[in-house]
Image (cartoon, rainbow, N blue to C red):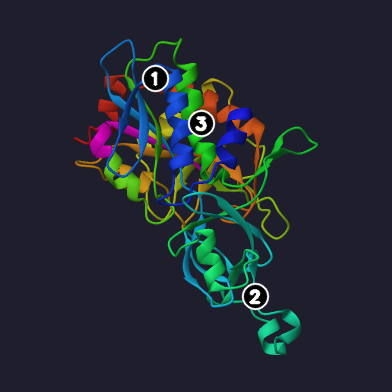
């Protein structure tokens, strides 16, 4: 888990993915793969297999939800705007890192004290537009002396930890450093195994603000088939537990529906058949809210078969999240076996719609 720890603790909100990209580049170079980038900062490794078959894309995304400084108050407080989707209820009193060109500053998300709120205000979710970040500065001039500027990114703070069950991962940014980790691990495992295609594995940028890297990167890597590696919603807590709903620790998550994509059903069925063939536990997700980079991949040029594979995760789009090591391991195993099956005839079958 050392690599996943390093990835999650790296700071990388949309548009500021440099720390994560350095890790991705280092790990891709260690596999001796050819590096491909797009003009926005997405990065991939290209590894040719035993046949000149289809180009298979495995892509996580490097960015995590965070914030940007938009205004400096005369008393030294920092106003901010979200980068990605946030629920105001999870923000207050959380620690954050404000990154500048020269150094980082620890701050806390603050608000008007609850003791001073009216009863009506206390019964509502406090609006983000009235929150601020307190870095201990006493004036606007002091903030500027420290080098903090409008436009600086703000990143949640949460150290990586394995909980006492020796399976639960607790960390920030599992959405979606987990997908980055899966891409790297699959590429490492396939260094010594044959596969009848060209594997392109890596991660996009700016997924959390509109699937932007997923729009540009296919033009750089030109895939014939794509798998977005991302997290899904674990529905196993009080008030959400339901029959056949995704749960942490119950296997790989395969998405059958989200707000941005209905997957290629032949590709979907091939993945499910592969999981059953190799006794890899899997779960199915159908969710009408939210989406992933596959929402852009599947519409590239004439359209390419696409799917989402990942792990059920708790508390995403907050300062902290949880996932299962077992699910991550099963996801790596399934992805390796799927890539080994994707020869040209398999992909041709998925896009042949003649009747």
Residue 73 lies in the magenta stretch: no
SS at mark 2 in the image? loop
Residue 120 to residue 69: above or below: below
* Mark 3, residue position: 182
Q: Which residues are magenta?
A: 218-230
The residue mark sitting in front, 1 or 3, is: 3
Q: Position of residue 68 (x, y in %)?
A: 47, 61
* Mark 2, residue position: 111
Residue 280 to residue 304: above or below: above
Q: Position of residue 268 (x, y in %)?
A: 41, 35
- Left or right, 314 with reference to 14: right
The reply to whether residue 98 is visible in this rendering is yes
Mark 3, other Cα within 10 Å: few <14 / some 14–19 / many ≥20:
many
- Left or right, 351 with reference to 155: left
Q: Quadrant of residue 112?
A: bottom right
Identify the mark nearer the N-term, 3 or 2: 2
* Label 1–label 3 contact, CB within 8 A: no
* Mark 1, residue position: 341
The reply to whether residue 281 is visible in this rendering is no
Q: CA distance from mark 2 to mark 1?
A: 54 Å
């Amino acid at each position: 888990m050392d690599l996943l720890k390093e990835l999650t603790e790296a700071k990388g909100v949309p548009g500021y993915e440099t720390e994560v990209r350095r890790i991705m580049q280092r790990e891709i170079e260690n596999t001796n793969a050819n590096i491909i980038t797009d003009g926005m900062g997405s990065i991939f490794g290209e590894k040719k297999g035993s046949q000149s078959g289809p180009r298979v894309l495995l892509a996580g995304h490097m960015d995590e939800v965070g914030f940007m400084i938009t205004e400096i108050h005369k008393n030294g407080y920092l106003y901010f705007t979200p980068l990605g989707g946030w629920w105001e209820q999870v923000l207050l009193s959380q620690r954050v890192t404000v990154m500048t060109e020269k150094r980082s500053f620890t701050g806390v998300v603050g608000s008007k004290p609850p003791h001073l709120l009216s009863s009506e205000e206390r019964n509502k979710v406090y609006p983000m537009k009235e929150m601020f970040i307190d870095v201990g500065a006493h004036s606007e001039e002091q903030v500027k002396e420290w080098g903090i500027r409008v436009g600086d990114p703000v990143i949640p703070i949460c150290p990586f930890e394995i909980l006492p069950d020796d399976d639960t991962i607790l960390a920030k940014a599992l959405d979606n450093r987990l997908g980055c980790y899966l891409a790297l691990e699959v590429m490492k495992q396939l260094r010594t195994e044959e596969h009848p295609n060209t594997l392109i594995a890596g991660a996009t940028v700016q997924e959390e603000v509109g699937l932007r890297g997923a729009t540009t990167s296919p033009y750089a890597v030109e895939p014939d088939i794509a798998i977005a590696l991302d997290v899904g919603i674990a529905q196993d807590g009080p008030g959400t537990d339901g029959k056949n709903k995704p749960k942490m620790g119950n296997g790989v998550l395969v998405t059958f529906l989200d707000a941005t994509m209905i997957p290629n059903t032949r590709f979907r069925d091939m993945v499910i058949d592969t999981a059953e063939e190799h006794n890899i536990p899997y779960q199915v997700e159908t969710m009408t809210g939210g989406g992933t980079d596959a929402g852009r991949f599947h519409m590239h040029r004439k359209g390419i078969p696409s799917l989402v594979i990942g792990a059920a995760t708790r508390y995403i789009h907050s300062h902290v999240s949880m996932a299962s090591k077992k699910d991550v391991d099963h996801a790596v195993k399934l992805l390796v076996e799927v890539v080994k099956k994707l020869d040209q005839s398999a992909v041709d079958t998925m896009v042949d719609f003649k009747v």
